[in-house]
Image (tube, helix red, strand yellow):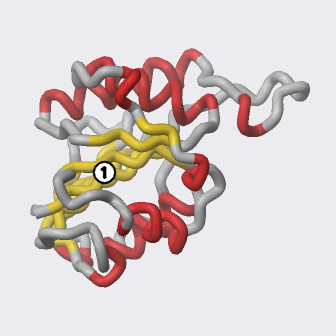
Amino acid sequence: MKTLYLLRHAKSRRDDPSLSDRDRPLEARGERDAAKMGKRCLQTNRKPDLILSSPATRAVETAKLVAQSLNYKARDISIDDRLYAATKASLIAVIETLGDTLDRVMLVGHNPGLAELAHHFDSSITLMKTCALAEFRLESASWAGLGQVRPVHTAFDSPKNGRCHFMHGMHGKEA
């Protein structure tokens, strides 16, 4: 069984036009939301074997705040340039190269690629707002061929939700 977590970066600052898109940091709300989602991940036993983050400042900061709540060492977060401005297809390509000893992987990145990948696995997910988390459990021993595997379990959460919404399969039915 493989578990894929897709986490969109938290709310970032846009008030400094001198910063490139890649260098925008989290705003205060983003920091709070990322810490909140990290605590929810801990409470619901969503601890990845690997956290893979886009190199964008807002994604790395989100990954670090979530990792802190999970007692996951920030130095163990893997930064992957391929996750910045990634498409659904390029995200699948990255995931399919993961080592099969990893069972639970979290990607921290950006829309529209993350939302498109989440929608690929569960058609009821059409939007991933900042700091939203989608979870997909896949009955597979390998990450290879991930794009063709259908999840046996799906869950979706965001900072504004009071609880995690659990769904099954591609249809997004509430459990």
Residue at 14%, 72% in the rendered image: 140
Estimate the x, y position of residue 24 in percent, counting from the top left. Answer: 71, 29
Closest to the observer, 1 or 127: 1
Q: Please, is residue 143 above or below residue 164 in the view?
A: below
Closest to the observer, 5 or 83: 83
Q: Is residue 49 left or right of residue 159?
A: left
Label 1's element? strand
> Which residue, as the protein is rendered here, is positioned at the far bottom?
148
Q: Is residue 173 left or right of residue 27?
A: left
Res 173 visible: no
Q: Is residue 26 left or right of residue 2?
A: right
Query: What's the residue type where badge 1 is placed?
Result: Tyr
Estimate the x, y position of residue 121 in percent, counting from the top left. Answer: 33, 72
How packed mark 1 is, by other alpha carbons closer than 10 Å (few <14, some 14-19, many 20 or more), is: many
Estimate the x, y position of residue 92 in percent, counting from the top left. Answer: 43, 69
Residue at 18%, 28% in the rendered image: 42
> Which residue, as the protein is rendered here, is positioned at the far right?
18
Closest to the observer, 133 or 95: 95
Res 171 visible: yes
Q: Which image quarter holds the C terminus?
A: bottom left
Residue at 44%, 19% in the rendered image: 32
Residue at 18%, 40% in the rendered image: 46
Q: Please, is residue 169 above or below residue 42 in the view?
A: below
Quarter occupied by residue 23: top right
Which residue is under mark 1?
5
Q: Which image quarter holds the N terminus?
A: bottom left
